Amino acid sequence: MSASAIAPAPRPHGRATLPLRTRLAMFLRLLAMQGSWNYESLIGNGVGFCVEPALRLLPGGVHSREFKEALARESRYFNAHPYLAAVAVGALARAELDGESPERIERFRTALCGPLGSVGDRLVWAGWLPFCSLLALAVFGLGGGPVLVIAVFLGGYNAGHFALRLWGLRTGWNNGLHVASALGHPVLRRGPHLISRIAALATGIAIPLALHRVIGPGRVLIGGVLIAVVLGALLIVRLHQRIEGWRLALAALVAFALFSVAH
Amino acid sequence: MWIDLLPVALLGGLLGLDTVSFPQAMVSRPLVAATLAGTLFGHAVSGLLVGAALELVALDTLPFGASRYPEWGAASVVGGAIFATHPSHPPGAMEMSMVAALATAWIGGWTMVKLRERNAVWAARRREALDAGARGAVIELQLLGMTADFARGALLALLAYAAFAPLTTAAIGTWGTDARISRAVVVTVAASVAASAAWKIFHGVTGARWYFIGGLALGLAMLAVE
């Protein structure tokens, strides 16, 4: 993030807190951030949609020139991880209500896209989601019923999901254009690495247990399947650049189905 | 079968919406979506079984940025619903449910790309209003995108279920492979994809392979104890 984007600036009509109703509206809208995702502005319109309740607090309200200019600015191209975009929404709301200059806000928006995307991808998509998924699969493999398995997955995943969005909104609002330092939070810096290790552990536990539950008892069959899984995984890793694993799975299952029907 | 179409379409719409648009709480993950579809037909455990197999495959496709990926919400509803309508789990039922779900996920990914292109067209039509900071245009565009996404998921689930449910029944009638062998093939394929996906995700993390080996030893020890 560039130094000019985070340098202090005067706050002509700054406010210390947002009304609860506004914060609630912003949080609920964050859940629909990607509602109009498209290849032109990505989540830009979503950011405008989420910041809009706060912009109503600008002098003159929704009919003022300030409101319209701010909303137009915030609805332009933006890209970030959808959960960590909450940081941007909070910070941009603060910047607009503090009366920061449009140029500074534009620079800040541009500077924020990269970090919020890469940190979120590593923390959530490559860490927390597979971890929660594999944990739930391990519970399934240990005999957990539908309610328990779903509760473990959705409860665990969304505890992190909602906490991250709430933290992002609050941190963004509290820090405004100075929010870059908050992205050095230990959870964001060390979290992805730690979660990846635990997820690797969960993978090792979950796969044999889950496949045992689906197939049913029988050591010889399980042993054969485990060897086949190792060979299959090696094959998919080798073919990684050429074909995705899930497409290969579809092709293999279609071939097997045709064989079984014709047999 | 026709009476099943409406609930399948509604659930497909809701869970298709969760994939990206709202609220992305991962209710659309196969483990949850297929189980919910199974519950709809009174056989939650059937949904859970096929959901677990699909979840292993879905580990290969995490929703990174603007990448293109299969849509698991509506697809898992189709897979879970088809498997749950064969509660005695005859040979071929799980394989065909998996094929139905994976094919639907593939088509679903394509429909998501088309929807994103459509969203861009709708945004372009409102460009003047958006540039003028019109509150109505921003909100309308957001609601339009979400409504279209719901409709996309519902229609996809409806058509896929209508196509694959009779195909599954027909395939089960002529299925010639033993039930346990058939299931073993399904989990071998699914677990191979999951293991390779785990390697892709974690191989760059220091020490992750030792954690994986440790976990594998623990998982195998648990199996041995059973």
Image (cartoon, coloured by chain):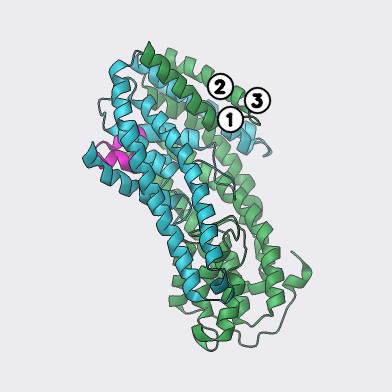
Chain colours: A green, B cyan
Q: Which residue is mark 2?
A: A232
**Closer to the camera: disc 3 or disc 1?**
3
Q: Is residue A17 left or right of residue A11?
A: left
Q: Are marks 2 and 3 in contact (CB under 8 Å)?
A: no
Asked if both marks, 2 and 3, belong to the same chain, the answer given is yes
Q: Is residue B55 left or right of residue B205?
A: left
The magenta segment is B35-49
Residue type, label 3: Arg
The residue pinned by badge 3 equals A238
Q: Tell me the SS state at disc 2.
A: helix
- Reading the chain from its start, which is encountered first: label 2 or label 3? 2
User: Where does residue B116 sit, x and y in percent of width and height?
Assistant: 52, 53
At numbered mark 1, what does the secondary structure look like: helix, strand or loop? Answer: helix
Marks 2/3: CA distance?
10 Å
Determine the secondary structure under disc 3. Answer: helix
**Residue A245: where, in percent of width, then height?**
55, 30
Instruction: Inspect the image, locate mark 1, and give the three-letter code of the amino acid beneath it.
Output: Ser
Q: Which residue is mark 1?
A: B196
Q: Quadrant of the N terminus of chain B?
A: top left
Q: Which x, y percent locates residue B102?
A: 45, 33
Q: Is residue A254 magenta?
A: no
Rendered residue at 37%/26% (across/down): B96
Image height of A160 relative to B12, above or below? below
Q: Is residue B97 above or below residue A168?
A: above
Q: Residue at x 27, y 41 (%)?
A: B39
